Image (spheres, rainbow, N blue to C red):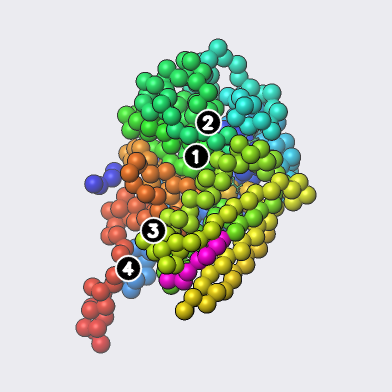
Amino acid sequence: MEYEVKPADGRLGILIPGLGAVATTFIAGVEAVKKELAKPVGSITQMGRIRLGKRTEDRHPLIKDFVPLANLEDIVFGGWDVYSDNVFEAAVNAKVLEPVLLHAVKAELEKVVPMKAVFDKSYARNLDGTHIKEGANKMELAEALMEDIRNFKEENGCDRLVMVWCGSTEIYIEESEVHQSIAAFEEGLRNSDPAIAPSMIYAYAAMKMGVPFANGAPNLTVDIPAIVELAMENGIAVSGKDFKTGQTLMKTILAPGLHARALGVNGWFSSNILGNRDGYVLDAPENFKTKEVSKLSVLDEIFKPESNPELYGDMYHKVRINYYPPHGDNKESWDNIDIFGWLGYPMQIKINFLCRDSILAAPLVLDLALFTDLAQRAGMSGIQEWLSFYYKSPQTIEGLPPEHDIFKQLMKLQNTLRHMMGEDLITHLGLDYYQDLVDTL
Ligand SMILES: NC(=O)c1ccc[n+]([C@@H]2O[C@H](COP(=O)([O-])OP(=O)(O)OC[C@H]3O[C@@H](n4cnc5c(N)ncnc54)[C@H](O)[C@@H]3O)[C@@H](O)[C@H]2O)c1
């Protein structure tokens, strides 16, 4: 199937539920990059290159020169939060970026003032914000969000919108009856069914307004049949879930390497300390459970213990997150990996990653917003599995196991871009041009 990609003309509005550490680091970062105060390191759309054609052709354009992406100059930001702080104030509170940098973009950040959130404390009991919408039922709240979206688009002269969830992790919810169809979901909205979390209300409003959605938290949100059905019906791109940053990023880089060399793994113990608001929300066991499920899924899919029982059948995998305020957004993680090699001889790998959570997540928000907008302009609706690269727990169509290996995810992302632009896909076989080179010797 050939795609006809519409140009990225006009303004793109990026709407963000949750203007906390990640979102404010993202917005401040884009404004700083626009003023040439810093570089968008970690963003594939801004700094990544893509190989085209044969290895001998030496064609490696920047991705942003290869596919038509929105320009940073054409982006407008908006969002919702349960706290009424503008993005400058919220960024200062998040303590991720230096005051000097924040002051250099203060005027731009102060302009982004959160709209009242759709929120219910029973989904994140450690939050106490009061900047919250009221409505007789969840359907009314969804309608209020649609009104916000309509007004934002008009007031900011946007041609297109995209929504990226950067809100807190909600309590653990499993898919149930109310999520199975659009009709059941809409009935649930009218009855304020407790299985419909606030993030799903944003997702529903986005789908009704034709706004594509990327889900940065491990919440179900767009990963339920009712929302996928709406996305397909209305021709809207969706993807999720849970930004793949610190420890899980390292896991999906390292585990494919161990697996590739048929090295065995007995155990993988992952521990973290972090002290930001995300860490505080995750300190509630019912919220941690949502994150834990997302973080645990990656190794099984990469190692496939059922097909490799001698190497991975007994693997013990544990993930802990501990709230530790003194570290703030500077998460520290430790991994102890017990591996074994030739003749079963044991070895250990230790990783101590002193990372910055929001610094790793911010470029992902930018890439997801720009690629989701690209997908939408290319007419690609429904689940965007090619964006699995960015997620801990990639959303796939029912019956299709997710791919967690970051190198396969990258290949899929790049081949999707090549396919979109009518370039040859790269298989890395190379036999064809080997023969050409041999012939010239
Ligand atoms: N930083 C990372 O590396 C990383 C990686 C993966 C996922 N995430 C996820 O991204 C999300 C944001 O992380 P953060 O560090 O910015 O957290 P944060 O606590 O600083 O920000 C989240 C914001 O969302 C707001 N919020 C919560 N519920 C809301 C609702 N219903 N509507 C509107 N606003 C709402 C909160 O008030 C808060 O300001 C979290 O779910 C986190 O788990 C972060």
The residue under label 3 is: 306
State the mark number for residue 215.
1
Rendered residue at 21%/83% (across/down): 439
Q: Are marks 3 and 1 in contact (CB under 8 Å)?
A: no
Q: Secondary structure at mark 3?
A: loop
Q: Circle 4 is placed at which residue position?
A: 428
The circle on residue 199 is 2
Kind of residue indicated by mark 4 = His
In the rendered structure, which disc, 3 or 1, sits on the residue that comes first in sequence? 1
Does any portion of residue 23 appear in the rendered image?
no
Pinpoint residue 233: horizontal percent, then vertical percent: 32, 29
Q: Are discs 3 and 4 less than 8 Å apart at CB?
A: no
Looking at the image, is 338 positioned above or below residue 68?
below
Q: Are there few (<14), some (14-19), or many (20+) residues within 10 Å of tag 4?
A: few
- Sequence-earlier tag: 2 or 3: 2
Res 281 quadrant in image:
top right
Q: Secondary structure at mark 1?
A: strand
* Residue 297 locus on image (x, y percent): 48, 50
Q: Foreground: 244 or 286?
A: 286
Image position of 355 (left or right of 61): right
Q: Dot 1: within a 10 Å radius of its alpha carbon, few (fewer than 14), some, or many (20 or more) residues?
A: many
Q: CA distance from mark 3 to mark 4?
A: 28 Å
Are there few (<14), some (14-19), or many (20+) residues within 10 Å of tag 3? few
Region rendered in magenta: 262-268
Q: Nearer the viewer, mark 3 or mark 1?
A: 3
Q: Amino acid at mark 2?
A: Ser
* Residue 272 - label: none
In terms of secondary structure, what is the magenta stretch mainly? strand
Kindly report the distance in space between the C-alpha atoms of the residues bearing marks 1 and 4: 32 Å
What secondary structure is found at the residue carrying circle 2? helix
